[in-house]
Image (tube, rainbow, N blue to C red):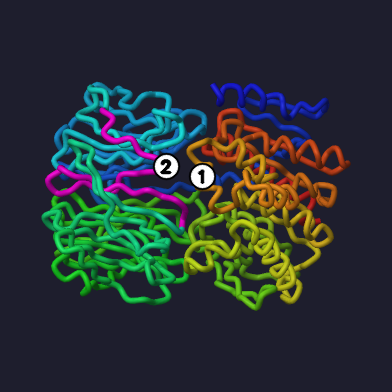
Amino acid sequence: MRRLALLAAVSLVPNLGRADRKEAGSLVMDGIPGVPPEIAERLEQYQNTRAASLLDWDPAGKGILISTRFADVPQVHLVAAPGAARQQLTFFKEPITEAAFDPARAEGFYFRMDAGGGEFFQYYWYDLAAGRRLLVTDGKARSQGLLVGNAGGRFAFTSTLRDGKDFDLYIGKGPEARPALRKELAGDWIPLDWSPDDGKLLIKNDISINESHIHIVDAETGDSHEIAAPAEGKKVAVSVARFGPGGRGVFFTTDEDSELARLAYLDLATGKRQILSPEGTAGVERLEISRDRRWLAYTLNQDGKSALFVAGTAEPSQATQVAIPSGVVTGLAFDRQSRRLGLALNSSAAPADVYVFDLAQRSVERWTSSEVGGLPRSRFVEPSLVQYPTFDARRISAWLYKPRATGKKLPVVISIHGGPESQERPIFNPLYQYWVNELGAAVVAPNVRGSSGYGKSYLLLDNGFKREDSIKDIGALLDWIAKQPDLDPKRVAVYGGSYGGFMVLASLYSYPERIRCGVDVVGISNMLTFLEHTEAYRRDLRRVEYGDEREPKMREFLERIAPTTNAAKIKSPLFVVQGANDPRVPASEAEAIVKIVRGNGGKVWFLVAKDEGHGFQKKSNKDYYQAAVTLFFDEYLLK
């Protein structure tokens, strides 16, 4: 009901008594001039690039499931062999980016899908023989983390069905029967792994990005206990955990007594822990183990790029690095026969594709080749990693994209990632490539304090009352830009989504004379109202990062630094983009900043998509939005 009420309210938001309000399909354009055809033509090839993500291996050895887009949104495809055609299996209007086979049922697979970007994800069984889907979950609450047992026949997931806030553990026995509530839980929980005999589950409880706990749950009784618990008073983050051979121990990543995550092993019988990767400048990210529990694979984050390692579980500290193309690994999965390791690999100059590492041959083979809109791949620009000093003598890392040859000072787009506990990494971004190659602009994408990838202390530098320090990091970046001989400090735009959208608004009011314009995509305009209205299952996680709005001093602080409070200082043109069904940053955040800035006489373009949530997923919506941003930059940045 809340989502329907929100959609009804937001459909009126862009009206605001304006004559320049237009609707086309699901899009509501308010104050946006008509986009010239030549802009759409310039963008078209970049918008038609594709990417492939790895979903699962067929248990019978018939290939891999991937997610890729051929029409409006990504769907499930089967690839039978390296370089084989992508056989599309699903044809829905909403994106599908998660799917898993059941080895006990060869005629289909489970997949996850929401409606209109609302993120109330449901799981379905897709019957390949009948060509039909069957709803497996309740159809109402948010479900996450579906894991099929090793032998198949049953699966686990967590859901907010009970109270809309807490993720309880459910066990299903086939798609036809209603999943059973196995254990009531408090907070955000997700299944990680089944034990080899399918008798137990590893599940993770996330308190914040700096604190998480791993429990073992009996799949029949629901009895549970915590493992790898930190010493009293310590906050430790455990990202991934997998059962070892025979279920006698657990491999997991932990940042206990370390700034960065390390690989560790816990003997369940003795409680003895062993650190398997040394303290260093690269943290362990992804971790996967083969079905026969003989092999493990993990990746390290080395200055934003991934290094892949494989080891036998008998000697896990003797891992060897696998030679893969330069880029970021976005998925790992061993096949059911424990002979091959699939990985999705994304780089700044090429979209994500799937590769396979043969454990016996020690060779890597490419399975998919995603199209890039007919553009020559040599045209894509690789970024350079730069650092700039900030107000407290720290050095902030940023990725800098520039046109290859120019004799002029370049306009600059500062692109600020969301999260904020995320990391700008050198992955393929067709919009960056378009801005660089077609608009002749430089793109600077910083990892301001609070970003991941630089240690747990760095993550904490923007929490709560320290929020304004991250805004100062953007001020320091503006200082750095002014000192670069080929960058134009008089032509700078800020662009960002979600928390990045908050940073756009905060930068516009903090440095009004130094920024030409800003694009805020699903951004927070007041953290106080955001915390009050974000979905209940997210609220406690966000309070750890932003501060608890129920505390009077924090409430006063959040109100003081809010862009809505400081909107009178925003002098530059602003473009606000919002999905009406956003469960994370409610559409009311966009409505508020648009109304206040316009009330102060400011220039605002406002775009709302009625069938989107936290960002635009549908190609038709995304195409218009990107064309409108281009027109906005043409108008307010490039001139």
Q: Is 536 colored magenta in this rendering?
A: no
- The image shows residue 518 at horizontal and vertical percentages of 73, 51
Q: Which residue is mark 1?
A: 540
Q: Which residue is mark 2?
A: 187
Which badge, 1 or 2, comes first in the chain's sequence?
2
| The C terminus sits in image quarter | bottom right
Compared to residue 267, the image places residue 36 above or below, namely: above
In the rendered image, is residue 390 in sight? Answer: yes
| The N terminus sits in image quarter | top right
Give residue 137's quadrant in the image: top left
Image point (53%, 37%), residue name: 619
- Left/right placement of residue 265 relative to residue 478 reads left
Give residue 408's quadrant in the image: bottom right
How far, Cα to Cα, is label 1 from label 2?
Answer: 8 Å
Image point (14%, 49%), residue name: 196
In the rendered image, is residue 447 in sight? Answer: no
Going by the numbered disc 2, the residue's amino acid type is Gly
Compared to residue 460, the image places residue 556 above or below, namely: above
Going by the numbered disc 1, the residue's amino acid type is Asp
Q: Count up the numbered dots.
A: 2
- The image shows residue 75 at horizontal and vertical percentages of 39, 36
| Badge 2 density bin: few <14, some 14–19, many ≥20, Cα 10 Å | some
- Left/right placement of residue 493 relative to residue 81 reads right
- The image shows residue 621 at horizontal and vertical percentages of 59, 35
Query: In the rendered structure, are the residues bearing label 1 and label 2 in contact, judged by CB atoms less than 8 Å apart?
Result: yes
Most frequent secondary structure within the magenta stretch: strand
User: For the magenta stretch, what is the residue range?
Assistant: 180-209
Viewer-side residue, 555 vs 596: 555
Image point (76%, 72%), residue name: 482
- Badge 2 marks a residue whose secondary structure is loop
Q: Is 193 colored magenta in this rendering?
A: yes
- The image shows residue 470 at horizontal and vertical percentages of 65, 62
